[in-house]
Image (cartoon, grey):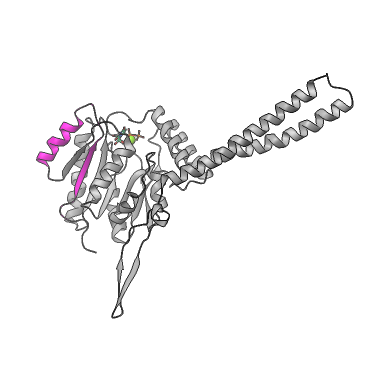
């Protein structure tokens, strides 16, 4: 394979404290990758300023003038980590063969980018960076994060355990990612949906180089909730199941109440009252669950996710020489 053009995409929100070091480390990496012929000249770092309120953008502008590796994209207002990342990925794919996404805070091991590239040369389209040792994270962060991965898996969502958004993606996977028109972005759930040859590289997660986490508990919970509700309708199904159970229970309660009535043990009026309470409760929950099931279906339709992703195609049988082309996927709407 000829040398690929690599773009490293870095979303930044109020990262003035860490940015100079990030620029330094990523430039060094790019420099050595170019020297070792792993990537082509013209590979760059793209900083996406996610509406920062501090000097982040002016720093990016300054580095852009003095350092040929540094490019920037400024969002008009804070759009959130996932949206900022997507903005960078889609911008970069126009002129790159592969894109690596990494946080600005240097928690993820930048030296692993070299291993990403080696895997890319071996023919992998997606390389996931997996956190092997998270001892640098607080106990709370580690416990909640790992609980979240378990919950997601039990809800039937395929995600990579201990992988955040540190990964390499080839141009064709990004072309296909663009077809997902979701507003509730949860990239680490979407990427595995694409398929394509993928592999993992392990590294130890470090502490933030400087500055504070831009993901307070409130944002973390919202993010987790988004992830679950964007990929799973299991919570709705639980309501339906509860409705069924309550309904079954109401039958038992009915028998109990009627037997009590026949034996003359009940206070007048209690039987009919308790029967109504159980029965109506059960029917209501069941009905809500049923409506939920339809809403779940509508939700899936509205997202218009591609039904399939084509990896390769053989066309034109020219003198026994078939051309292999990479193909984009078909949006769900094209099927009808
Ligand atoms: N970030 C962003 N927009 C936001 C919040 C965060 O672009 O609204 C960026 C942030 O600058 C960093 C990355 O997302 O590069 C991850 O954030 P952070 O390191 O604070 O999260 P943590 O590692 O604590 O989960
Ligand atoms: Mg971080």
Numbered disc total: 0
Hey, which residue is sitting farthest bottom in the picture? 319
Q: Is residue 94 above or below residue 11?
A: below
Quadrant where the N terminus is found in the figure = bottom left
Front residue of 127 and 112? 127
Q: Is residue 297 left or right of residue 17?
A: right
* Residue located 68% across and 34% down the image: 246
Residue ID at (66%, 38%)? 244
Q: Answer whether residue 45 is magenta in the image.
A: yes
Question: Residue at the front extreme?
Answer: 336
- On the picture, is 183 further left or further right than 228? left
- Residue 220 falls within the magenta-colored stretch: no
Give the residue furthest to the right.
Answer: 263
Residue in view at x 35 percent, y 40 percent: 205
In this image, 96 relative to 314: left or right? left
22 over 317 or under it: above or below: above
Task: Return the x and y of residue 166 as percentages of the image width and height.
Answer: 33, 45
**In the drawing, does residue 122 fall left or right of residue 62?**
right
Quadrant, the C terminus: bottom left
Q: Is residue 15 above or below residue 33?
A: above
Percent x, y of residue 266: 84, 21
**Residue at the image point whose x is 71% and y is 26% from the top:** 277
Q: Which residues are magenta?
A: 40-68
Tell me which image quadrant ligand 2 sits in: top left
């Amino acid at each position: 394979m000829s040398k690929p053009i690599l773009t490293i995409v870095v979303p930044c929100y109020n990262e003035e404290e860490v940015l100079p070091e990030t620029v330094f480390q990523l430039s060094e990496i790019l420099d050595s990758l170019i020297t070792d012929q792993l990537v082509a000249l013209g590979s760059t770092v793209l900083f996406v300023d996610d509406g920062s309120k501090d000097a982040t953008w002016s720093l990016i502008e300054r580095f852009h003038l003095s350092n040929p590796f540094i490019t920037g994209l400024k969002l008009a207002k804070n759009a959130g980590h996932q949206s900022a990342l997507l903005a960078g990925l889609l911008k970069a794919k126009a002129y790159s063969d592969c894109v690596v996404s990494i946080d600005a805070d240097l928690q993820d091991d930048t030296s692993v980018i070299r291993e990403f590239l080696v895997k890319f040369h071996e023919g992998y389209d997606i390389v996931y960076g997996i956190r092997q040792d998270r001892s640098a994270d607080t106990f709370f962060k580690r416990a909640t994060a790992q609980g979240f991965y378990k919950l997601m898996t039990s809800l039937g969502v395929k995600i990579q355990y201990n992988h955040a958004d540190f990964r390499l993606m080839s141009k064709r996977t990004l072309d296909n990612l663009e077809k997902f028109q979701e507003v509730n972005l949860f990239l680490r759930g979407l990427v595995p949906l694409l398929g394509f040859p993928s592999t993992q590289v392990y590294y130890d997660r470090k502490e933030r180089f400087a500055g504070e986490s831009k993901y307070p508990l409130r944002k973390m919970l919202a993010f987790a909730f988004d992830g679950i509700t964007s990929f799973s309708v299991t919570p709705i199904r639980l309501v339906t199941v509860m409705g069924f159970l309550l309904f079954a229970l109401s039958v038992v309660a009915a028998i109990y109440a009627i037997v009590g009535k026949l034996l003359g043990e009940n206070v007048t009026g209690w039987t009919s009252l308790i029967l109504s309470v159980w029965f109506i409760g059960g029917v209501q929950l069941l009905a809500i669950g049923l409506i939920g099931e339809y809403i779940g279906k509508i939700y899936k339709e509205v997202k218009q996710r591609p039904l399939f992703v084509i990896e390769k195609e053989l066309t034109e049988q020219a003198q026994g020489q078939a051309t292999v082309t990479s193909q984009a996927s078909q949006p769900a709407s094209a099927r009808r």
